[in-house]
Amino acid sequence: MRQIAVYGKGGIGKSMISSHISFAFASNGLRVLHLGCDPKHDSTRLLLGGQMPHAILDVLREVGFMTQRVKLDDVIYSSPLNDSVPGMLFGAESGGPVPGSGCAGKGVTEAIHTLSQLHVADELELDAMLYDVLGDVVCGGFTMPLKRGYAKEVYIVTSGELPAMFAACNISKAVARFAQRSGVRLGGIVGNLRNMANEREILNRFAQQLGTQIVGFVPYSEKIKAASGRGETLFQYAPDSPECDAMRQLADNIYNNESMDVPEPMTFDELHHWWQANKAA
């Protein structure tokens, strides 16, 4: 079973992109579980008809964190889009603590433990599992897919903007740290374009600097915003658009990717000087 983690700065578009990857995989006949690892629990929204499912952490609270009282159907949701794909698409959300009351990474830790206890991969006969993970703060909970070896390949969504690249460097540091322990590798960078000057070239150079590759570019587009506002992916909203073609190509590139690397991240000072030298190149 392929286990893929998609990381990126909050607001960079990783949930939108990872939803399209999961749908494309199911369109190619795979049985896919999409796990949202963010306290907002909105990663699966585009795959579940615009609805936000009951989060795993909320279910655990209801049963006093006794995982033996949790059933698969309590935390796993079958996508209403399954009628349109030859594979199968499932969604789940880790959830998080009540705001101001605890560590947001706890939801990820508890969710992964619960799914492991439920033998989700075997029960659902999964071909792939995709973790959509918040990347602003790479704390213990949010690194669970990496350090425990659940996800063997990581993709980082970033634009050419400095804050997004800073988060990408932090995530790369986590991958490098756990590479020997868990075997995790960086599969590449996904460029979610923000309409900056020379942005593609900046991102190509950034990937090279990290010792990895670009696996795809997602164009800046009002269609993507409109589709998200309707609670749909581009596969439903604009299937014949160039933007949807870019998503298909990205998913194919990830599915066929055999180039996995241990990254060589920059420090913030190194990144800042590098970005200043390259932003106008």
Image (cartoon, rainbow, N blue to C red):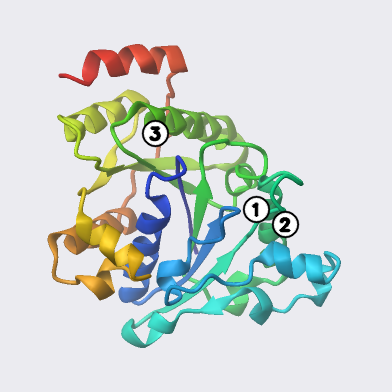
What percent of the width, then of the height, locates residue 30?
A: 39, 74
Q: Could you classify mark 1 by the number of other residues whose Cα lies within 10 Å: few (under 14), some (14-19), or many (20 or more)?
A: many
- In the picture of the structure, the residue carrying the numbered disc 1 is 108
How far apart are labels 2 and 1 at the CA level? 6 Å
* Dot 2 amino acid type: Glu
Which residue: 42% across, 55% down? 15
Element class at badge 2: helix
Q: Is residue 30 above or below residue 204?
A: below
Q: Could you classify mark 2 by the number of other residues whose Cα lies within 10 Å: few (under 14), some (14-19), or many (20 or more)?
A: many
Labels 1, 3: front one: 3
Residue 192 visible in image: yes
How far apart are labels 3 and 2 at the CA level? 27 Å
Give the position of the C terminus as an image quadrant.
top left
241 vs 267, nearest the viewer:
241
254 vs 11, nearest the viewer:
11
**Image marks 2 and 1: residues in contact by CB distance under 8 Å:** yes
How far apart are labels 1 and 3 at the CA level? 22 Å
Which residue: 68% across, 78% down? 74
What percent of the width, then of the height, locates residue 118?
A: 70, 72
Circle on res. 110: 2
Labels 3, 2: front one: 3
* Dot 1 amino acid type: Val
Q: Is residue 152 left or right of residue 239?
A: right
Which residue: 67% across, 71% down? 119
Q: Could you classify mark 3 by the number of other residues whose Cα lies within 10 Å: few (under 14), some (14-19), or many (20 or more)?
A: many
Circle on res. 34: none
Residue 117 visible in image: no
**Can you tell which quarter of the image residue 20 is in?**
bottom left
- In the picture of the structure, the residue carrying the numbered disc 3 is 164
The disc, 3 or 2, on the residue closer to the chain's N-terminal end is: 2
